[in-house]
Amino acid sequence: MTAPAETAPNRQRPKLLRALSSRNYRLFFGGQSVSLIGTWITRIATSWLVYRLTGSDLLLGVVGFCGQIPTLVLAPFTGVFVDRHNRHHILIATQVFSMLQSLALAILALSGTITVAWILVLQVAQGIINSFDTPARQSLVVDMVEDRTHLANAIALNSSMVNGSRIIGPSIGGVLIALFGEGWCFMVDAISYLAVIGSLLAMHMASEPRVKTGSRAVDDLRDGFVYVTQFAPIRSALILLALVATMGMPYSVLMPVIAAQVLHGGAHTLGFLMTASGVGALAGALYLAYRQSIVGLGKVMVLSTFVFGIGLAAFGFSKTLWLSLVLLTVVGGGMMIEMASTNTIIQTIVEERLRGRVMAFYAMAFLGTAPIGSLLAGVLADRIGAPATIVIGGLACIVAGVWFSRKLPALSELVRPIYVARGIIPDSTDAPRSL
């Protein structure tokens, strides 16, 4: 229960920022905001470096595949690990290892010894780190927020933080690449990790693991799999997210091709494109942060999936920079709202003892399936061109949205008892539909 002395300041905090009333979440938000700018600088620098070294659409897809396939393979196992160990300590370790990975990229690039092979190896290493980092990070948000009614706001603010950095990071990255080369982008990223590591060390968190169990790890793994596959609301939400991530999200790995071949630009053009997507995603995240209730997020998921798919298909036909920037703003907003809404619903309805495992499956759906999409996009782009590949991805997302919309009424009835039990909606026949 919040102490009386803290009640007045919390009431005065703007609704948009209400989750920041929790000290630990405030620290995390500040440190991560700095670090994520560095992360996006590295992402744009890596894509541009690979394309500069090879000129290959296919290799852009291969790099994306190597960076994300470990999450698809390892996530179920890392979810069990996260549920059995201290999430705070896991997150500190993943940030330290991520810093070392960026430092290795910087040293290789600045020394002139960087090759595509080294990039692929280090992408796999970062993918392994992320397979632990993502479920630990998603699960730890619940521990950081003192008032559970602020959970949805915290998740939305996380999305705002990620996409605010998407606006700033690529812009800085484009300038750094043009002035100093990719190596200094990687070095800036390595230094930026000090901010989030410092914020994590400053937190006051319980030192013991959240879940203590005498069961075998294989039994915990089976329990998580059975829960995710048999509970229809979580299963359906993850399938929709996986379809969108597989068919739609790989557009980002083809951005260097669009910037160079379709729009006839350079690194700065790539930065503009990524920034436009980030602006839309930030707007979508702020919309979710302003929402006062999670009721109705299922409909929001459907609408945002349609917006994402239509915007993506239209972007594939665009031949001018200004139109591409407008469409990417729409694309970024649609994807972010769909992803964050899914996260919020799952975090709300999941059983606490299974949170780490379920969020690992969420990581599989969002990040783990993306490498398949990246590889597929690279192969298709090599054969039919990047624009046509992006159009196909957008149309596939529209079909996925139609599928989920038809299941929504039945899913809403399954979620209603959970929302009632947790005080989200009243137990009455005239209560609003939960999803």
Image (cartoon, rainbow, N blue to C red):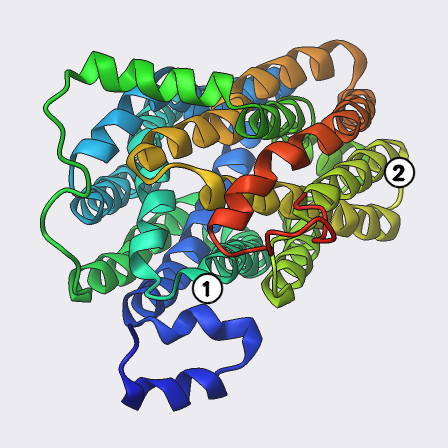
SS type, badge 1: helix
State which quarter of the image contains the C terminus. top right
SS type, badge 2: loop
Placement of 292 over or under 71, stated as above or below = below
Residue at 24%, 64% (x, y): give it: 199
Residue at 82%, 47% (x, y): give it: 327
User: Could you say which is closer to the camera, residue 246 or residue 231?
Assistant: 231
**How many marks can you see?**
2
Residue type indicated by callout 1 = His
Image quarter of residue 312: top right
Outermost residue toward the front in this view:
428
Q: Is residue 372 left or right of residue 391?
A: left
User: Where is residue 240 drawn, in percent x and y?
Assistant: 65, 27
Image disc number at residue 150: 1
Q: Is residue 57 left or right of residue 383?
A: left
Q: Is residue 260 left or right of residue 395?
A: left
Mark 1 is surrounded, within 10 Å at the Cα level, by few (under 14), some (14 to 19) or many (20 or more) other residues, namely many
Placement of 360 over or under 164, stated as above or below = above
User: Where is residue 313 drawn, in percent x and y?
Assistant: 84, 31
Image quarter of residue 175: bottom right
User: Where is residue 35 drawn, in percent x and y?
Assistant: 37, 56
User: Could you say which is closer to the camera, residue 95 or residue 64?
Assistant: 95
Q: Which residue is mark 2?
A: 318
Residue at 46%, 63% (x, y): give it: 149
State which quarter of the image contains the N terminus. bottom left
Which badge, 1 or 2, comes first in the chain's sequence? 1
Residue type indicated by callout 2 = Ser
